[in-house]
Image: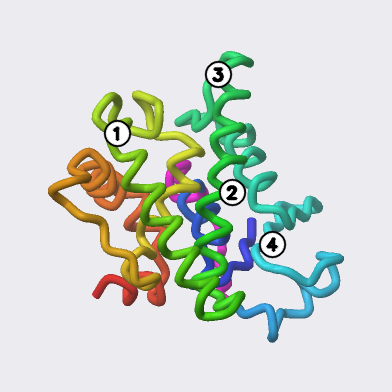
Amino acid sequence: MTFFSDAGDQYSHRVRIVLAEKGVAVDVIDCQEEELPEDVAALNPYNSLPTLLDRELVLFEPGVMMEYLDERFPHPPLLPVYPVARAESRLYIYRIQRDWSRYADIILNSDGSDAEIEEARKELRDSLVAISPIFAEKPYFMSEEFSLVDCCIAPILWRLPAMGIEIPEAQCKPLVKYMERLFNRESFQESLSEVERELRD
């Protein structure tokens, strides 16, 4: 299995967390979209990152990659067994994508005017502060177990300093504790690229 990854990209990071969580033997190749290896350009119609190769299978959408890996390597499971709970998890991921990931993209990629970036920074911070209390109920996002939902949230939270977002610790103790649980997981530490480690050094 080969994973073509952008070392600084939150979407590549999601998949690397799943690969590490599953203990998959994979060749991770760091590259940039401007200088893609010929393998990627030939196999991925969008010439995009991340791209996952598993024998003849080529995947080029992070959400599909994550679910494929969870099914291909069932232990530990990262989605619930029951259809209703699985659907709820997928909706959480969808909402993270529509809200937090979108704001993170605007900030990290400078996609917008200074005012739009500042607004995205405010919206993301306020949303995280508002949701902090739910992390007091369960150790992970709406769950007793680490899941694909956490794999989507962790890269955003890790990048908060790089986005110029500071979480008020006194006001957000459950969220801060959740971040510590995520960042201390062995799989999360294994997933980090050198570029990502430098974000918090």
Element class at badge 4? strand
Q: Amino acid at mark 4?
A: Thr
Specify few, some or many for label 3: CA neighbours under 10 Å numbering under 14, 14-19, or 20 or more. Answer: few
Cα gap from disc 3 to disc 1, whole angstroms: 18 Å
Q: Quadrant of residue 40?
A: bottom right
Residue wearing tag 4? 51
Measured from the top left, where is residue 80 in percent x and y?
52, 22
| Quadrant in which the C terminus is drawn | bottom left
Amino acid type of the residue that numbered disc 3 sits on in the rendered structure = Ala
Q: Position of residue 140 (x, y in %)?
A: 34, 33
What residue range appears in magenta?
19-30
Distance Cα–Cα, label 2 vs label 3: 18 Å
Quarter-of-image position of residue 3: bottom right
Compared across the picture, whether 39 is left or right of 10 comes to right
- Check disc 2: other Cα within 10 Å, few if <14, some if 14-19, many if 20+: some
Give residue 97's mark.
Answer: 2
